[in-house]
Amino acid sequence: MDLAIPPPKRDPQRQRSMRKGMYILPSLFTTGNIAAGFYAIMQIMHATSTEFYHLDYAAKAIGFAVLFDGLDGRIARMTGTSSDFGKELDSLADVITFGVAPAMLAWAWGFNLMPSVLPTGSINIKLTQLGSIACFLFLMAGASRLARFNITTNPQPSNPGRPGKKYFVGMPIPAGAGVIAAVVHFEGGDPVQSWYTALTWLAMVVAVGYLMVSTWRFYSFKDIDFRSRHPFRVIILLAALVAGIWVFSGPVLFGVALLYMFSGVLWRLQWIFRRHGDPPPPSYKQASQTS
């Protein structure tokens, strides 16, 4: 006589405990994000004109924070552990790590530690002051970008094309911070040495801040599904990217950051030319005459 073995009983309390533990996992990556931002700020404070390598350490910390920020959101979506607390904590972490830290890094590297290259000391002071204003605008743009993202339920780019989760409305603040960090890391933390380079850097910081508060579209990478049947292309590309960063971190990260930044600009220009190239729709009077 065969006896069916009953399935093991599930402990509801244990399942609830495991479920609560899963909510901690994304928050751990967010905590790593905050820790990286705090470390970057400390390194910036220790940087001098002779010990500028601290700026490179700060740029690397911001780079790791970008990785942590991407992982916490993806893990939360994959495990179904998204929560209001996690979203608020992530926003606060982004203000610190991708707002305050890169703004201080941009100011220290491009203006504060720049040697006195002009004969008039007052001009150097004015240039440093203009740089501080530009970096503050970058910080405010990043904070405004996060505030708009938190209150927008269905963001739609002004040049939609294919609206939805595939695109961000405006350049995300981790990408903006990544541009600042990538440029500093590409130079090894060596501060700006000329006034015209400082002016170029000032314009770039302001431009990145504008892209964050714009309504231009930037690719979000959220439609990449690692659980699909054929993720080989994505895996190969990621492996090649990781290998390139491991061997040539400065040039590769510099190229990736600028390519992502200019991708939004190119999409915007493409949309403008396409809109002006299309014939205008017929007016109501013309439509009634032809009917």
Image (cartoon, rainbow, N blue to C red):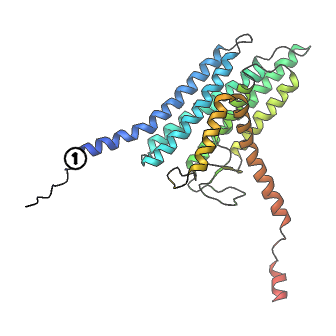
Q: Which of the 4 image quadrants contains residue 42?
A: top right
The one of 272 and 243 positioned closer to us in this rendering: 243
> Is residue 133 found left or right of 150 in the rendered image?
right
> Is residue 206 found left or right of 42 in the rendered image?
right
Assign the N terminus to one quadrant of the image.
Answer: bottom left
Percent coordinates x, y for residue 90 in the rendering:
52, 38
Q: Look at 65% across and 19% down and name the residue there.
A: 44
Q: Look at 56% across and 26% down and name the residue there.
A: 36
Residue at the outermost left position = 1
The one of 272 and 206 positioned closer to us in this rendering: 272
Position of 287 relative to 228 (above/below): below
Q: Which of the 4 image quadrants contains residue 184?
A: top right
Assign the C terminus to one quadrant of the image.
Answer: bottom right
Percent coordinates x, y for residue 252 in the rendering:
71, 34
Position of 231 relative to 207 (above/below): below
> Is residue 274 found left or right of 18 in the rendered image?
right
Percent coordinates x, y for residue 247 in the rendering:
67, 28
Q: Which of the 4 image quadrants contains residue 163?
A: bottom right
Crowding near the residue tagged with mark 1, few <14, some 14–19, many ≥20 C-alpha atoms within 10 Å: few
The one of 224 and 82 positioned closer to us in this rendering: 224
Query: Which residue bears the numbered disc 1?
Result: 11
Residue at the outermost right position = 119
The amino acid marked with disc number 1 is Asp
- The image shows a total of numbered marks equal to 1
Percent coordinates x, y for residue 208 in the rendering:
73, 38
Label 1, secondary structure: give it: loop
Residue at the outermost front position = 1
Position of 152 relative to 282 (above/below): above
Residue at the outermost bottom position = 291
